Amino acid sequence: MKLKIEVEGLDKLPDSAEVREALSKAMEDAAEKIRRRAIERTPVDTGYLKSAWTPLIKLGSGISFGNYAPYAGIVEYGLYPGLGPKTVEFRGRIYSSQAPGGMVGPVVRDREFISKLGDEVSENVKKALHD
């Protein structure tokens, strides 16, 4: 799953180390908020899945995180083999009843939350450049 946040007005800022650092920090903060929301949505039975989230990882110009539990994809994409006491049908797939729609997906599809993050990134960059 990939999410792209665009910040208006960046093209008007000078291309400097200060601007790049401010933007990098603001994007890290936004990615960490997405990561924390995904962790909050993580279903708990034994606690392994919730403990298996990676920290943020910088990859080129992007930031990534993931979950190394072998069954994380089943929970995220609703790939349970059938309905049972701990599952629910949602949008034609079978998810954990604790996380219908997955863990990360609902977070990145929350337009209001993502829009607010974009605004925060923009404000944090402006603030860092004026300090």
Image (tube, rainbow, N blue to C red):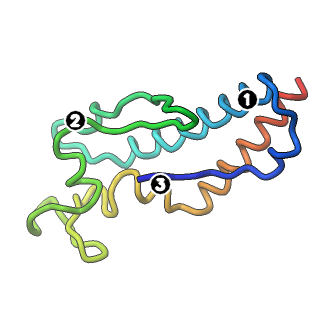
Taking the spot 46% from the left edge, 40% from the top edge, the residue there is 35
Q: Would you place residue 4 above or below residue 125 in this image?
A: below
Q: Residue 83 at x, y = what percent?
A: 11, 69
Q: Amino acid at mark 2?
A: Gly
Q: Amino acid at mark 1?
A: Arg
Image quadrant assignment for residue 131: top right
- Residue identifier under label 3: 107
Q: Earlier in the sequence, mark 1 or mark 3?
A: 1
Which dot, 1 or 3, sits closer to the camera? 1
Image quadrant assignment for residue 22: top right
- Residue identifier under label 1: 20
Q: Earlier in the sequence, mark 2 or mark 3?
A: 2
Q: Secondary structure at mark 1?
A: helix
- Residue identifier under label 2: 47
Q: Which mark is residue 120?
A: none
Taking the spot 68% from the left edge, 52% from the top edge, the residue there is 6
Q: Amino acid at mark 3?
A: Val
Q: Residue 38 at x, y = what percent?
A: 41, 46
Between residue 120 and residue 125, name the one nearer to us.
125
